[in-house]
Amino acid sequence: MSLSNASVLSGATITPSGGTALAFEGTGIRGNSHTLVASADTNLLTRRSIVCTVKEPRVSPGAPNGYTQARATAVFKSPLVLDNGNTTVNTVRIEVSYDSESTAAEVDELLVVASQILSDSDFASLFGSLSLV
């Protein structure tokens, strides 16, 4: 399949299987962010991390219901030492934005669909080879 005829399941139950657990531990909360690092990574230059951030809705007269959308963001960073000795950082950024009137079930459905976009084979060429077909 391809992006042109991709499909995901609505109302699905997403359950990862296989693999090995990669544990993350919190390094502390600052303001609206919480940083987690892979506890197995001992080298600070190549330590994988996740930074979670939240933004609460705030009053905005121009917004459809008078408030901005709530936002939750998780940024996974995986440093990579290149063959030439330089270090680069591979990054995955996940952001969920929703109206304050959204129900928990509606937010859950957003997450179910988004997780399939990240893992479904229909979208593999988008992320793996930057193909839009």
Image (tube, rainbow, N blue to C red):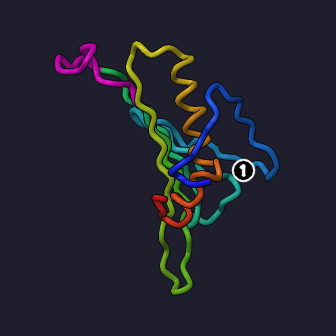
Magenta includes 32? no
In the picture as drawn, the residue positioned furthest to the front comes out as 5
Q: Is residue 78 above or below residue 85?
A: above
| Dot 1 crowding, Cα within 10 Å, few <14, some 14–19, many 20+ | few
Q: In percent of the image, x 57 and y 54: which residue is there?
A: 2
- Would you name the residue on which mark 1 appears? 22
Q: Is residue 108 above or below residue 130?
A: above
Q: Secondary structure at mark 1?
A: loop
Viewer-proximal residue, 121 or 110?
121
Q: In percent of the image, x 38 and y 25: which residue is there?
A: 70
Question: Where is residue 37 shown, x and y percent of the image?
Answer: 59, 50
Q: Quadrant of residue 13?
A: top right
Q: In percent of the image, x 80 and y 44: which residue is there?
A: 17
Residue stretch rendered in magenta on the structure? 58-71
68 sits to left or right of 90: left
Q: In percent of the image, x 52 and y 83: which residue is there?
A: 85
Q: What kind of residue is marked 1?
A: Leu
10 sits to left or right of 64: right
Viewer-proximal residue, 44 or 5?
5
Question: Where is residue 10 shown, x and y percent of the image?
Answer: 61, 28
Magenta includes 63? yes
Q: Is residue 72 above or below residue 1?
A: above
Principal SS element in the magenta part?
A: loop
